[in-house]
Image (spheres, rainbow, N blue to C red):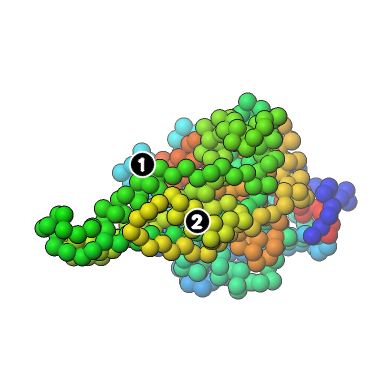
Amino acid sequence: MPDASAPSTDAPSIAPLAADDVRDEVVTLLRQLVSCDTSNPPGHETQALAIIEAFARDAGLDTERVVKEDDRANLIVRLRGSGGGPSLGFLGHLDVVPVDREDWSEEPFAAVERDGAIWGRGTVDMKCQVAATTVALARLARAGFEPRGDIMLILVSDEEVGDAEVGAPHLVEARPDLNPDFVIGEGSGERYDTPVGPVYLLDCGVKRSCPVTITALGETGDASLPDIKRNAIHELGRLIGRLEAWESPTVVVPELEGMLDVLAPGVEGDEERVAIARRAHPGLDQVVGALTRTTFQPVTLESPEPLNVVARRATMQVQAIALPGVTRAQVEAEVREALGEGHYELEVEEPAGGLITSPDSPLRDAIEAFLAEHDPEAQLVPALGYGFADCHLMREHYDSTTYGFIPFRNADPMQNLATKHGADERIEVEDLVFQTQAAHFVAQRIGQLTA
Ligand SMILES: [Zn+2]
């Protein structure tokens, strides 16, 4: 781990990217990527990957595919370092979540430009960052910038579903030597206008996912005699109601103390601090709410009996998203408390995730230095992420200093939160330009560090 936090003076600097100079190039690349339908399932990410690969080679960057399945390849793009400095990886995924076309006001894979934004699936999550970092690296390469450590793009398939084992899980197994010192991936980056000024959160680690299976138990019998036996589906209905009504207790983990100090200065008591932080912005109401308790979300229901028989078993899968440090036993105890008495079986899997990166690092310094120049009023506030991201694997396998951060300087955070797995996902062109400038700045700053 390098300890230098300021750029050394002898490495030559490249001029900052001017918005007018880079806008067309990054918009064109993003539109090409969005036009590839990489909905997962099934993915077909290689078509989008090939566009990045060709673009990167044209700029003189090294490229290397890491493939388990031809149609679902991963790609490493590299601006080679001269040695003696830390490496940096921009981690991105090329798959997107599927669309419900009837909910969209634009064709989701046409990458239409309208009202100063590019509309389409993946524009926010996260082909914007893929386009921005690719153009940033290409610009550094064309300008002859020579970093000390390698600057990489690490582009993976199958992030959104993640169970095909072809994306990040394959990449870390196939390339144990990749070992980036620093990684920036997805997570946070919305700009919240709050009573204490504009705030960007820095995602230093995500909560733990913990799949829970609840099976309601009934008694088999004739479906035409409504009162003769206990129906498992009725029982499950009661349990679902209790789970929905459950209020998980507020918990402030140490990683969020700093965020609450900023958003609720001088306030005593965790309940009150969290309440004030949530009131700072409607987006923070959602995000802070998710980061200060375990959340339970039913995701599937199933009952296998035939139509003429009272259901004997009915099963519900629940995603429990727990705070870092929460154990399987604690999740189980909370679910039992929420469900109360009833006829059911409960299975709670071992939670995954929850690794945290220290918020103090040269990478955070580099991001702050960028914001100081380009958005000087705003504060960067270390926090956690609320959903799973492949960043976790970079922490787990490489022990990389890893943050989730893609800055959206202009967008209404509520628009991002509501559209990124929903309809009418779109990115303001000026945010795409800002992301490109940020990547160019941070890559250069890290590239100038000595080990
Ligand atoms: Zn994503």
Residue drawn at (68%, 47%) of the image? 254
Amino acid bearing label 2: Ala
The residue pinned by badge 2 equals: 333
The residue pinned by badge 1 equals: 104
Foreground: 159 or 387?
387
Above or below, comparing residue 284 to residue 124 in the picture: above
Residue drawn at (71%, 56%) of the image? 401
Foreground: 324 or 418?
324
Between the C-alphas of marks 1 and 2, the distance is 41 Å
- Within 10 Å of disc 1 (Cα), the crowding (few <14, some 14-19, many 20+) is some
Residue drawn at (65%, 67%) of the image? 397
Judge from the rendering whether residue 78 lies leftward or rightward of residue 192; answer left or right: right
Amino acid bearing label 1: Trp
Q: Furthest residue to the right?
A: 10
Q: Position of residue 55 (x, y in %)?
A: 58, 57
Which of the two marks, 1 or 2, is nearer to us in this view? 2
Local secondary structure at mark 2: helix
| Residue 182 appears in view | yes
Residue drawn at (13%, 62%) of the image? 222
Judge from the rendering whether residue 336 lies leftward or rightward of residue 362; answer left or right: left
Judge from the rendering whether residue 340 lies leftward or rightward of residue 135; answer left or right: left
Q: Position of residue 237 (x, y in %)?
A: 30, 50
Q: Position of residue 171 (x, y in %)?
A: 58, 68
Q: Quadrant of residue 90?
A: bottom right
- Within 10 Å of disc 2 (Cα), the crowding (few <14, some 14-19, many 20+) is few
Q: Quadrant of residue 300?
A: bottom left
Foreground: 430 or 5?
5
